[in-house]
């Protein structure tokens, strides 16, 4: 049954949200909760965003509480903002972490390619929502630095974080301007 839930989650992530809703309409809420647990949090939030508030709450209650928490956080933002677009699972390291430690995280084969292009450096806590954002270190810089160098000394000074309320159009413009696939998203 768990394998079926994982396969259904994989299938749903490939479809537009309206088709996802049609596929899960007839399923038991507990089953949908298990499938949502298998999905990436941002994809689960996109799917739930197509539903009424009461449907969202029912399905969030059916999810594992640890899996539901980042989905709830994403649903608190409008979908056409940086907050609504962000992933709750970027690669985050402390400024004292080394280049070697960061590269070890980026080598994870299960990591989506856009997330494996950069490391976000923050103060503790290092789980989202994190402590104060310090900066970004791109993979090209990591490959050129000494493995023992602290990330805090490798920060790319050209990066500006975007606020969670920034429009998706502005996010797209910044992605194009920086020629990157991800941006740091921060709140106050």
Image (tube, helix red, strand yellow):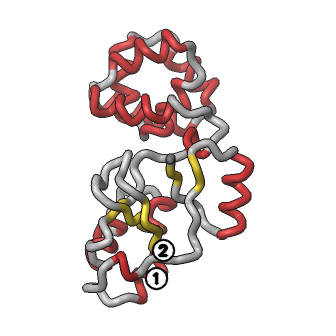
- Which structural element holds mark 1? helix
Q: Residue at x 50, y 47 (%)?
A: 188
Q: Residue 9's quadrant in the figure?
A: top left
- Name the foreground residue: 23 vs 105: 105
Q: Residue at x 32, y 71 (%)?
A: 95
Q: Residues within 10 Å of mark 2 (few under 14, many from 20)?
A: some
118 left or right of 51? left
- Name the foreground residue: 52 vs 165: 165
Residue 138 - label: 2
Q: Residue at x 52, y 46 (%)?
A: 86
Quadrant placement of the N terminus: top left
Q: Residue at x 57, y 69 (%)?
A: 159
Image spot of residue 151 (x, y percent): 35, 76
Label pair 1/2, CB-CB below 8 angstroms: yes
Image spot of residue 98 (x, y percent): 27, 77
Q: Residue 101's quadrant in the figure?
A: bottom left
- Label 1, label 2: how far apart the Cα atoms are: 5 Å
- Which structural element holds mark 2? strand
Image spot of residue 89 (x, y percent): 39, 49
Q: Which residue is mark 1?
A: 141
């Amino acid at each position: 049954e768990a394998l079926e839930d994982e396969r259904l989650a994989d299938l749903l992530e490939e479809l537009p949200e309206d088709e996802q809703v049609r596929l899960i309409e007839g399923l038991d809420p507990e089953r949908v909760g298990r499938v949502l647990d298998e999905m990436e949090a941002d994809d689960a939030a996109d799917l739930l965003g197509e539903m009424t508030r009461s449907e969202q709450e029912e399905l969030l209650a059916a999810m594992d509480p640890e899996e539901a928490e980042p989905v709830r956080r994403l649903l608190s933002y409008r979908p056409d903002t940086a907050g609504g677009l962000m992933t709750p699972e970027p690669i985050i390291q402390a400024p004292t972490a080394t280049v070697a430690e960061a590269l070890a995280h980026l080598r994870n084969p299960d990591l989506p390619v856009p997330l494996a292009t950069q490391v976000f450096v923050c103060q503790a806590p290092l789980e989202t929502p994190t402590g104060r954002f310090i900066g970004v270190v791109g993979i090209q810089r990591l490959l050129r630095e000494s493995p023992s160098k602290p990330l805090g000394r490798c920060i790319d000074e050209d990066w500006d974080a975007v606020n969670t309320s920034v429009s998706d159009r502005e996010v797209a413009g910044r992605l194009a301007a920086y020629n990157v696939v991800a941006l740091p998203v921060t709140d106050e």
